[in-house]
């Protein structure tokens, strides 16, 4: 089974590409941080990312989702972010890299959970704010740099997915899978 990651700056279009891949027949696994934010905001915490416990909540949900994806059909899975993204988030927010996050980073490395080539969805040149995405364009570029550095530090190679029409971006991802894996979608 091949587990591919989509990452990049907030608002770059990862989720749109993921939806396209899902509609093409590929199993996808959702991002955890957005859901942790939504839950905690619904519980009355306006900025949950300011609490250092946020990092462990995200990494725990990522692991549950990654392990739950084992039973999905097909040879290829796409994941919206990974524990390496959570590491980058902790660095960006100035939170400590917790023992739980360190253990998960060690686990995914030792078990070779994810493919070493990561699809890095590049910024379209702006950020649209949402309830969970409250970052300026300038800050998103700093966050993007931290992500690239984190993936390199953990031995992953980022495959850039340039800005452009959604179909072109998704097709660029599929082209990198190779012919056998590309046939498993749709």
Image (cartoon, grey):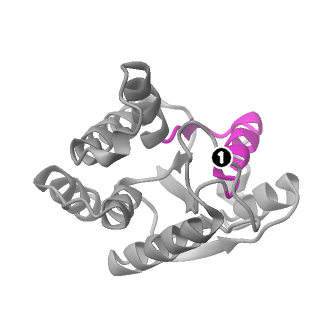
Q: Position of residue 91 (x, y in %)?
A: 32, 67
Q: Position of residue 88 (x, y in %)?
A: 37, 65
Q: Is 19 one of the magenta-colored residues?
A: yes
Name the image quarter holding the C terminus.
top right
Q: Position of residue 86 (x, y in %)?
A: 36, 55
In the picture of the structure, the residue carrying the numbered disc 1 is 129
Residue at x 43% of width, y 42% of height: 33
Q: Nearer the viewer, residue 32 or 186?
A: 32
**Residue most toward the top?**
43
In the rendered image of this protein, does residue 63 appear above or below residue 97?
above
For the magenta stretch, what is the residue range? 12-31
Q: Is residue 79 visible?
A: yes
**Location of residue 122 by image quarter:** bottom right
Q: Is residue 113 visible?
A: no
Residue at x 42% of width, y 27% of height: 41
Q: Position of residue 121 (x, y in %)?
A: 65, 64
In the rendered image of this protein, does residue 66 appear above or below residue 93?
above
Q: Is 113 one of the magenta-colored residues?
A: no
**Residue most toward the left?**
99
Q: Nearer the viewer, residue 63 or 88?
A: 88
**Location of residue 95 by image quarter:** bottom left
Q: Secondary structure at mark 1?
A: loop
């Amino acid at each position: 089974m091949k587990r591919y990651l989509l990452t990049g700056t907030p608002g770059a279009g990862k989720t749109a590409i993921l939806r396209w891949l899902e509609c093409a027949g590929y199993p996808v696994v959702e991002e955890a941080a957005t859901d942790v934010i939504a839950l905690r905001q619904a519980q009355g915490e306006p900025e949950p990312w300011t609490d250092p416990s946020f990092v462990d909540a995200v990494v725990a949900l990522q692991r549950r989702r990654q392990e739950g994806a084992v039973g999905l059909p097909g040879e290829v899975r796409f994941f919206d972010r990974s524990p390496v993204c959570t590491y980058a988030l902790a660095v960006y927010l100035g939170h400590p890299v917790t023992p739980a996050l360190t253990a998960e980073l060690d686990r995914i490395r030792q078990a070779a959970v994810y493919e070493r080539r990561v699809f890095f969805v590049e910024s379209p040149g702006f950020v649209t704010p949402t309830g969970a995405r409250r970052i300026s364009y300038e800050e998103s570029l700093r966050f993007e740099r931290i992500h690239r550095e984190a993936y390199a530090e953990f031995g992953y190679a980022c495959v850039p997915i340039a800005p452009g029409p959604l179909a072109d971006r998704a097709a660029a991802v599929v082209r990198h899978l190779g012919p056998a894996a590309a046939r498993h979608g749709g």
